[in-house]
Amino acid sequence: LSVKLDRAIKTLKGQGKISEINVASTIKEIRRALVEADVNYKVAKEVTDGIKEKALGRDVLIAVSPGQLLTKIVHEELTSLMGGSQADINITGDPAVILISGLQGSGKTTFTGKLANRLKKQGRQVLLVACDIYRPAAIDQLKVLGEQVGVEVYAEPENKNALQIAQNGIAQAKKTGKKIVIVDTAGRLAVDDQMMAEIEGLKKSLKPTETLFVVDSMTGQDAVNTAKTFNERLNFDGVVLTKLDGDTRGGAALSIRAVVDKPIKFISTGEKMDAIDLFHPDRMAQRILGMGDVVSLVEKAQEAFDQQEADRINKKIRKNQFGFDDFLSQIDQIKKMGNIKDLMGMIPGMGKALKDVDVDDDSFKPIEAIIKSMTPKERENPDLINGSRRQRIAKGSGTSVQEVNNLMKQFEQMRKMMKTMNKMGGAKAALGNMM
Ligand code: GDP
Ligand code: MG
């Protein structure tokens, strides 16, 4: 999509202002690009009509290149179509009940675990309720996730009445002081009446605070149709868009929003329990436009960064005592953030560069091997590491002296940068700015 848009917008470059004639072919290109990104044709037409109107209205007002202006307008238009600002979920109630709906395989159970994890990190008391009564494995799956994130799971493996289980779960939450109950439900491979009746019944009886509809963003046009059907039956409160980490086109976000007129509240970006984000329309617009999602990247980095560790390292940086053990711990922090390639792909320009490169946790292996071949003294005081020590380290780690030298050089540069930041007044402030 971004290549197409690039081209469409480039045809406008070098032209003084946006006029009906020079904008027409560009708009057509943009529309085609949107449709190719799984945006529903009607929606794509609406978007581009809006863009055209705004572009023509603003041509004489702003003195930027038409290409820049159009990019900005496209971005604004996509943002506003996806809801403008972000929407969170309502968790007031005693307890608040969050009902999770969607097709089988859309990512409901995974999302249930992630949401619990997120709420728990915010200091909330959460109970998960396993209401997928059709697949015995579904209960176990939720239990495993619950254990992983440290949240209790309520289940009744012998009971075949989803509503009863949910009600018992809610009673249990009241008894044990849990303020939020998340009800994971059964899905089917396609919309069918029995499933719909069941989830509808759950909604009517439980009167949840939030009913969320979970949908796989990789299912393209089907995602839109499913959303429409579920919304007609359930009148849900918000959408969760999953699997946005894959080779996914953001178009589903745009179409679903336009067709059901309900906010997208969360996005799911991987199988790990921290791969969840609030939905930010402006960032999704950026992603659709291929600008790179820097803000998401930064937020993710910050969340994964363990505060205590940060304080400890900051202290060392302030005293110019940053050593290789600290470096190792930083690498661990980076790994915690999730798939490295995904993270780097969010940096503008990096996505293309990384296309054929394999960047994953393994990329750090040689670095870790080198550091682990250093003695504790050497790690603490890298200045000790002279030529003969480098040879020994290379041998011990199964790398070359060249690789050891490279790492030493990079490390030195890092330390120099830290020293400079210290002079600028507080490493923490400087790091804060960088983040
Ligand atoms: P459910 O049937 O709706 O409960 O779906 P599950 O939660 O069991 O998920 C189905 C499959 O999709 C599992 O293999 C999950 O690990 C995977 N999955 C769920 N969410 C994501 C996501 O955001 N990204 C990726 N890559 N996989 C996901
Ligand atoms: Mg499930």
Image (cartoon, rainbow, N blue to C red):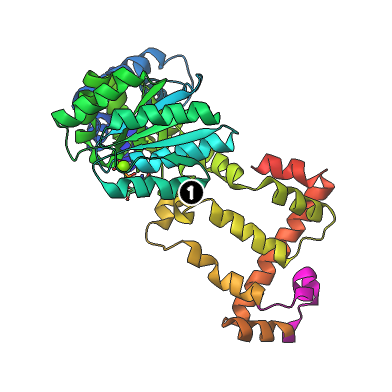
Given residues 323 and 226, the one toward you in this image is 226
Visible in this render: residue 308?
A: yes
Q: Quadrant of the N terminus?
A: top left
Residue 250: quarter of image: top left
Q: Residues within 10 Å of mark 1 (few under 14, many from 20)?
A: few
Residue 384, image x, y percentages: 80, 77
Looking at the picture, which amino acid does disc 1 mark? Glu
Compared across the picture, whether 273 is left or right of 262 comes to right
Given residues 146 and 10, the one toward you in this image is 146
SS at badge 1: helix
Q: Write the start and end of the magenta stretch as one range.
A: 373-388
Residue 316, image x, y percentages: 80, 56
256 relative to 338, above or below: above
Residue displayed at 84% across by 48% down: 423
Given residues 132 and 278, the one toward you in this image is 132
Visible in this render: residue 282?
A: no
Give the residue at mark 1. 147
Residue 58: quarter of image: top left
| Number of numbered markers | 1
Residue displayed at 61% across by 60% down: 331
Compared across the picture, whether 55 is left or right of 37 comes to right
Residue 402, image x, y percentages: 61, 79
Q: Residue 378 lies in magenta, yes or no?
A: yes
Residue 111, image x, y percentages: 40, 39
Residue displayed at 66% across by 60% down: 329
Q: Quadrant of the C terminus?
A: top right
- Ligand 2 lies in quarter: top left
